[in-house]
């Protein structure tokens, strides 16, 4: 026996019976605390982007094994039958035509006087030597022969100063910055190397601010359209603005997108936006608490719930979580079916009864809340218990897609829209000013809505640069 062990045993033997009992109680409490701590750390180590709400960027270099919730379609990779495809095709009216005449035959005869048999067309698509054209507007002034007053012609609106960039060029700057997400430095380098234009960062910012102001009527019309949509998808994400963490909020419909930049994430931002408090339809979201303060019709993202259930299965081994994930996958298939009418009452009733039965059985698997010794407040629930409680509390929101065919199973529409904000941060960095963040939000709303409606995006941006933005028209009523 080691000397340390002998000394420890001697110390314990010297204790009275009451002191030994107190020591055992303290040690058992410490063992329970450390056991719970180890279990929590193991659970955290087992979390990744496939079984929790953590983003894929947090996985690092050790990516988890693929466990996609998507099912194999059985189709071969590549373009599918009926896919239009894109390939370079000849145009009927080329900009320039060059004729190439044969001089001699292979036998040595001169072909100058020979008749033309046929002409083979080959077209080359190439950039011109000069991409940037300069148009000089000469404003003619004349003197009145009677009164002697000088009168000049009216200058076109794009020539308000001695030298300026036109609306198409400014539109290209906004297109590259806010759609292609080019950083300022790379954008100015592209203009210098390809166009021969010495553009600075301030020129790009000025083009963005002019477009931001021109898009005010677009945003007003967009808000009116969103209020009349049957379903809104909501999401939010953080972005560094002026050295601090601020929040980008998105509200999406099938053919509309609205972004908002705000210092807060919760109720204050929702109130400032004003749409959700006045909205009468269904709001689809990821169970962020402040959304439940407004309206009565909510739907939760099933994809998020499936990831959380997968994490509970893998990290805590609960059978109820596996059973419920299988049920929700069945719900997703029913919700994605092409039928445009409500599901049969018998089918909906079966899903709801099975849902309740699984949660009732799962309650017995949950560990009781653990009270941390020496800490005040309520006992801490496990992640599985919190998820179980949320699924019970928001049962109607989880199964909303079964009752309303307009409500999808997941919140992927908002996820795809809000992803553009994170993409901008990865490529171009944070926003330097609050005004710049607000300009990006409005311009990106315009870009996303234009893309969803299948418009000519660059032409829409050119129209906005000329202070005549495209305005989304009210949706025609369905017959």
Image (cartoon, grey):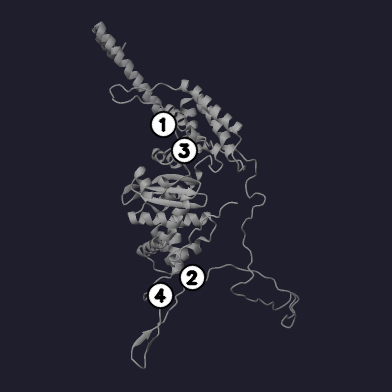
- Which mark identifies residue 159? 4
Residue 85 visible in the displayed image: yes
Q: Is residue 411 above or below residue 219?
A: above
Assign a secondary structure to mark 1. helix
Q: Which one is in front, 179 or 288?
A: 288
Assign a secondary structure to mark 3. loop
Tell me the crowding category of disc 4: few under 14, some 14 to 19, or many 20 or more residues within 10 angstroms, Cα based.
some
Q: Which residue is denoted by mark 2 in the rendering? A: 131
Q: CA distance from mark 2 to mark 4?
A: 19 Å
Mark closer to the observer (4, 3): 4
Residue 179: x %, y % from top left = 46, 57
Res 405 → quadrant = top right
Residue drawn at 46 percent across, 38 percent down: 49
Assign a secondary structure to mark 2. loop
Residue 343: x %, y % from top left = 60, 37
Tell me the crowding category of disc 2: few under 14, some 14 to 19, or many 20 or more residues within 10 angstroms, Cα based.
few
Mark closer to the observer (3, 2): 3
Q: Which residue is denoted by mark 3 in the rendering? A: 49
Q: Which residue is denoted by mark 1 in the rendering? A: 44
Sequence-first disc among 4 and 3? 3
Q: CA distance from mark 4 to mark 1?
A: 61 Å
Q: Are marks 2 and 4 in contact (CB under 8 Å)?
A: no
């Amino acid at each position: 026996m080691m000397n340390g062990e002998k000394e420890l045993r001697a110390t314990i033997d010297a204790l009275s019976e009451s002191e030994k009992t107190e020591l055992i109680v303290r040690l058992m409490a410490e063992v329970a605390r450390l056991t719970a701590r180890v279990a929590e750390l193991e659970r955290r180590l087992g979390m990744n982007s496939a079984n929790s709400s953590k983003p894929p960027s947090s996985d690092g270099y050790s990516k988890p094994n693929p466990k996609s919730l998507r099912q194999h379609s059985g189709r071969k990779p590549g373009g599918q039958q009926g896919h239009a495809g894109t390939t370079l095709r000849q145009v009927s009216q080329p900009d320039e035509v060059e004729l190439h005449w044969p001089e001699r035959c292979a036998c040595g005869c001169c072909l100058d006087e020979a008749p033309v048999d046929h002409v083979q067309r080959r077209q080359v698509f190439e950039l011109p030597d000069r991409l940037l054209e300069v148009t000089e507007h000469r404003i003619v002034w004349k003197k009145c022969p009677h009164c002697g007053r000088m009168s000049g012609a009216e200058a076109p609106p794009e020539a308000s100063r001695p030298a300026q960039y036109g609306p198409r060029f400014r539109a290209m700057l906004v297109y590259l910055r806010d759609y292609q997400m080019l950083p300022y430095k790379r954008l100015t380098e592209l203009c210098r190397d390809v166009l021969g234009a010495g553009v600075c960062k301030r020129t790009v910012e000025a083009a963005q601010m002019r477009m931001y102001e021109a898009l005010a009527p677009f945003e007003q019309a967009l808000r009116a359209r969103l209020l009349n949509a049957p379903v809104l998808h909501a999401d939010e994400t953080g972005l560094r603005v002026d050295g601090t963490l601020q929040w980008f909020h998105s509200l999406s419909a099938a053919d509309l997108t609205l972004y908002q930049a705000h210092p807060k994430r919760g109720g204050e931002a929702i109130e400032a936006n004003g749409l959700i408090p006045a909205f009468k339809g269904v709001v689809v979201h990821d169970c962020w608490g402040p959304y439940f303060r407004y309206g009565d019709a909510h739907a939760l993202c099933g994809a998020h719930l499936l990831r959380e259930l997968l994490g509970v299965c893998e990290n805590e081994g609960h059978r109820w979580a596996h059973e419920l994930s299988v049920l929700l996958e069945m719900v997703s298939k029913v919700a994605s079916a092409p039928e445009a009418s409500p599901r049969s009452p018998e089918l909906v009733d079966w899903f709801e009864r099975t849902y309740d039965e699984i949660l009732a059985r799962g309650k017995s698997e949950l560990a009781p809340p653990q009270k941390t010794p020496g800490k005040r407040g309520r006992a801490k629930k496990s992640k599985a218990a919190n998820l179980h409680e949320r699924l019970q509390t928001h049962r109607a929101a989880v199964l909303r897609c079964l009752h309303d065919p307009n409500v999808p199973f997941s919140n992927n529409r908002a996820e795809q829209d809000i992803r553009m904000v994170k993409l901008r941060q990865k490529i171009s960095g944070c926003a330097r000013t609050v005004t710049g963040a607000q300009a990006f939000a409005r311009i990106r709303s315009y870009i996303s809505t234009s893309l969803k409606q299948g418009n000519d995006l660059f032409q829409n941006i050119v129209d906005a640069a000329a202070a005549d933005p495209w305005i989304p028209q009210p949706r025609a009523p369905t017959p």
